Image (spheres, rainbow, N blue to C red):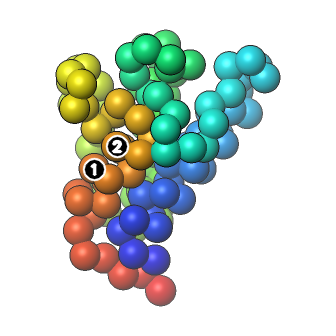
């Protein structure tokens, strides 16, 4: 898998895990446009931290690399990597760099 595939798979798995714990009305869509912070998000602060930790764990399982996302939780600017699923995927891909796991 390349970095983009790892990032997408980790985020998708974290969304699935989180959705198993939430009601139907609180489900996160596995779409690049899904808001993680700011207007339109389904995540409160605890849900966001739970999601971040799950993504970190999934990245480590898939790539054997650790990427810390917890510092991003305090960055709530318009260009935060945690704004949407798509922006997080882009950020993780850049953090993982050139990687290939077969």
Q: Is residue 56 visible?
A: no
Identify the secondary structure beneath mark 2. Answer: helix
Give the label on residue 87, or none: 2
Identify the secondary structure beneath mark 1. Answer: helix
How many discs mark residues in the rendered view? Answer: 2
**Distance of label 2 from label 1 (alpha carbons):** 6 Å
- Residue 65 image offset from top left, x and y in percent: 31, 62
- Residue 48 image offset from top left, x and y in percent: 45, 24
Q: Is residue 78 visible?
A: yes
Give the label on residue 64, or none: none
Give the labeled residue for mark 1.
Answer: 91
Q: Is 41 placed left or right of 80 in the picture? A: right
The one nearer the camera, 84 or 20, is: 84
Q: Dot 1: within a 10 Å radius of its alpha carbon, few (fewer than 14), some, or many (20 or more) residues? A: some
> Does residue 45 sit above or below 59 in this rendering?
above
Marks 2 and 1: CB-CB under 8 Å?
yes
> Does residue 25 sit above or below 52 in this rendering?
above
Residue at 36% x, 44% y is 88
> Does residue 72 sit above or below 7 in this rendering?
above
């Amino acid at each position: 898998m390349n970095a983009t595939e790892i990032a997408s798979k980790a985020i998708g798995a974290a969304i699935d895990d989180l959705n198993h714990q939430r009601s139907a009305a609180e489900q996160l869509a596995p779409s690049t446009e899904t808001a993680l912070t700011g207007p339109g998000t389904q995540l409160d602060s605890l849900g966001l931290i739970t999601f971040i930790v799950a993504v970190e764990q999934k990245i480590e399982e898939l790539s054997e690399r650790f990427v810390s996302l917890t510092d991003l939780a305090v960055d709530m600017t318009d260009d935060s990597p945690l704004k949407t699923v798509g922006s997080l995927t882009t950020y993780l891909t850049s953090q993982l760099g050139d990687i290939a796991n077969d």
